[in-house]
Image (cartoon, rainbow, N blue to C red):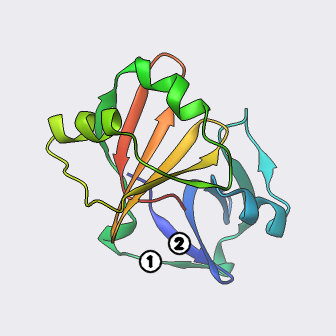
Amino acid sequence: MSKVVKYKEDLFYIHLRENGKIVLSSTDGRKAQKYGMTVNQGIGYYLTVPANEVEELYDGKYYRRKLFNLDIKFREYLLSLSWPEKYPVSQELKKEFKENNIIFNNDVIIKKNHQRQWRIVDGENQYTIFDLGNEINVHNGGVI
């Protein structure tokens, strides 16, 4: 699990610590533009900052872990979603989550975060879907 930190007014994951500096990571394109972050193979953005400019946080709601793999058949549906629009979650996707013991409210939405990353918001509960090419993972928590 990645540690969450605050840099200026935004939250990031710590990607790497070295020589008094911290490499921050995020998948949020708005943060990338705001801070001039560099992209890494289309899957995330990185920024190196002095360690003393980062406030370390501990809050379990920001930690993310893999819950299950999503069937590859959902790739076409996921790729059809356009950023920054919000969509209702399809019945088939709701069924897949239900088979993994996650039952959504009626007003659950999905939105594209990044090229191969989506966020599902169900009230205060959030899930992130990552398309890694050979598999599609579902993680708890939103994206930082």
Check disc 2 and give the amino acid type.
Answer: Val
Q: Check the image and report above or below for 109 versus 135.
A: below
Determine which quarter of the picture holds residue 137: top left
Determine which quarter of the picture holds residue 58: bottom left
Q: Nearer the viewer, residue 53 or 92?
A: 92
Check disc 1 and give the amino acid type.
Answer: Leu
Instruction: Name the image quarter holding the C terminus.
Output: bottom right
Q: Nearer the viewer, residue 4 or 130?
A: 130
Count every numbered label the image shows and give the total. Answer: 2
Q: Nearer the viewer, residue 9 or 21?
A: 9
Q: Is residue 99 visible?
A: yes
Determine which quarter of the picture holds residue 85: bottom right
Residue at which label 2 appears: 5
Image x and y of residue 87, in percent: 52, 51
Q: CA distance from mark 2 to mark 1?
A: 5 Å
Q: Residue at x 71, y 52 (%)?
A: 46
Label 1 element class: loop
Q: Residue at x 73, y 56 (%)?
A: 29
Residue at which label 1 appears: 57
Mark closer to the chain start, 2 or 1: 2
Q: Residue at x 51, y 58 (%)?
A: 143
Label 2 element class: strand
On residue 13, the disc is none
What is the crowding at mark 1: few (fewer than 14 residues within 10 Å), some, or many (at least 20)?
Answer: few
Q: Is residue 17 visible?
A: no
Taking the image as shown, residue 46 lies to the left or right of residue 93, namely right
Taking the image as shown, residue 31 lies to the left or right of residue 78, namely right
Circle 2/circle 1 CB separation < 8 Å: yes
